Amino acid sequence: VNCAEFKEQVLSYAIGALDARERRSVEAHLDSPIVHEGCVEALHDANEAASVLALALARERPSAGMWKAIERRLDGAARARTRSPFALVGWLVAAVALVLIIWLTYDRYQIIARLRAADAELQRASAQIRVEHEALALLDRPSSRLVALPPTGKAAGDFSASVILGPDKGYVVATGLTPQPEKDYELWLIRGGKPIPAGLLRGGGAGPVAYAIDPALLEGGPVDTVAITIERAGGVPQPEGPIILAGKI
Amino acid sequence: MLSFLFTAGLAAITRSDEALLVAIARGDRRALKRLYERLAGQALAVALRVLRSRGEAEEIVQDVFVEVWQKAGRYDPARGSPRTWVLAIVRNRSIDLVRSRQVEDRTTSEAGVQPDAPTASPLEEVEARQVRERIRQALSSLPPEQRRTLELAYFEGLSQSEIAERLSDPIGTVKSRIALAMRKLLASLGDWEAAR
């Protein structure tokens, strides 16, 4: 279709009298990027002439609900836009951000808890090393004594322990004091036949662990015997459980 | 004098309709309502003339005004006035509905019996009546077979070959009738324009 043919057909096009193939040809010509010879103007005039048929009709009175129905549809479309994929993406981003924040917060607390546990373990290990160094230093002093606490055989276990005693300090080095449920290992200093509770020996295991004896307990005079018993958790003021290790000084 | 009033009124209506479409394209709901008040009655008449069912016609008109709201920015004044654009959408949608649903011919006692819906202002109503009267005069000046051919195409969606078959006329005759009738209407519009 060229411009002359278009202008011949545009009157039938505007009135809707072309078949589908002819209509497509006319529309393709109109959309073609050429310099038209009055095609758009011809279409304008043809459309206006065709509208005469519509304008000649007596107008009808729309029902009262028609405008309200249109408004409802426009409002519905506006609401749908707020629920559009873009809005959904917004909600998804917000949800992902929330999950990320929760995860990061949870992870942060987990990391803090793990760091605190590691710090406590480090402190305990440092304290243990310090005690061991002090025990070795005491052992090097000529005034110190090393006394073995042989197993009594009154409880099952591979226990062994030694006591390093100086004039004002004392240490117990024990092996095999593995934790037992609802129980604690308790150290006793026996002086004049009277057992004096000297603390709970916790944190032991298969390897040797050094424990410091409260120096105040050594000020009351020479100790006759050192013993270790298994007692109720938290310890007792007087020995109740089996003596697993004991040695005369 | 009457001709001057008619053409001046038609031009004023077209200019204000274009302003309304610009406002609608910016999202002005009141402008859409104003355009609806101006065109809904005519749009409903076209849909009813094609569909012969008031319920379907009202549904089409609702669809078209929703479409106008969504596509006002695409209106091209080079191709026709806003009124022509809206009525063409109504006509095309109605024809599509007839074809897709194969609506049976219904005898209608509805079309054309309702009183005209009032426009927003008495002046516009006067102008609209003048426009319609001149248009009716132009249409009545056409020979009956030319007018019938245009109506079969415009209101029933028949192609030239279908009209030829319906009227048992050669297709060349149908094409000639359409061309002659449309040129007469164009000439009438030209006379109105020249009279401004």
Image: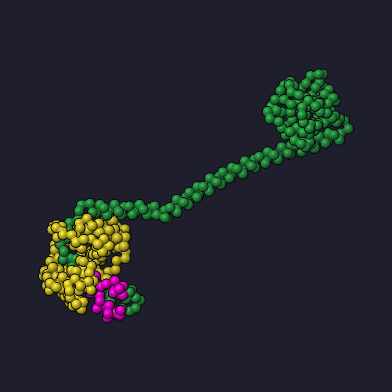
Chain colours: A green, B yellow
Count of numbered circles in the view = 0
User: Which residue is at 32% across, 52% downward?
Assistant: A76
Q: Tell me the quarter of the picture where residue A145 sits.
A: top right
From the viewer's perspective, tell me whether residue B154 is left or right of residue A113: left
For the question of whether residue B37 can be seen, the reply is no
Up the image or down, B122 lies above or below A189; here it is: below
Query: x and y percent of residue B126 in the render?
Result: 13, 62
Decide whether residue B81 is among the magenta residues. no
- Pinpoint residue A55: horizontal percent, then vertical percent: 18, 65
Question: Percent position (x, y) of residue A128?
Answer: 75, 37
Quarter of the figure with residue A39: bottom left
Q: Name the magenta segment's main secondary structure.
A: helix
Task: Tell me the quarter of the picture where residue A203 sits.
Answer: top right
At 27% from the left edge and 72% from the top edge, which residue is drawn?
A19
Q: As rendered, which of A14 and B123 lies closer to the eye?
A: A14
On whether residue A12 falls in the magenta region, the answer is yes
Residue that sits furthest to the top in the current view: A193
In x, y percent, where is residue A155? 77, 27
Residue at 20% of width from left, 58% of height from top?
B53
Q: Is residue A39 above or below residue A243?
A: below
For the record, the magenta segment spans: A1-25
Front residue of A195 and B156: B156
Question: Residue at 12% across / 66% down in the picture?
Answer: B133
Quarter of the image containing the C terminus of chain A?
top right
Residue A78 seen in render: yes
Residue that sits furthest to the right in the current view: A142
Q: Quadrant of the N terminus of chain A?
A: bottom left
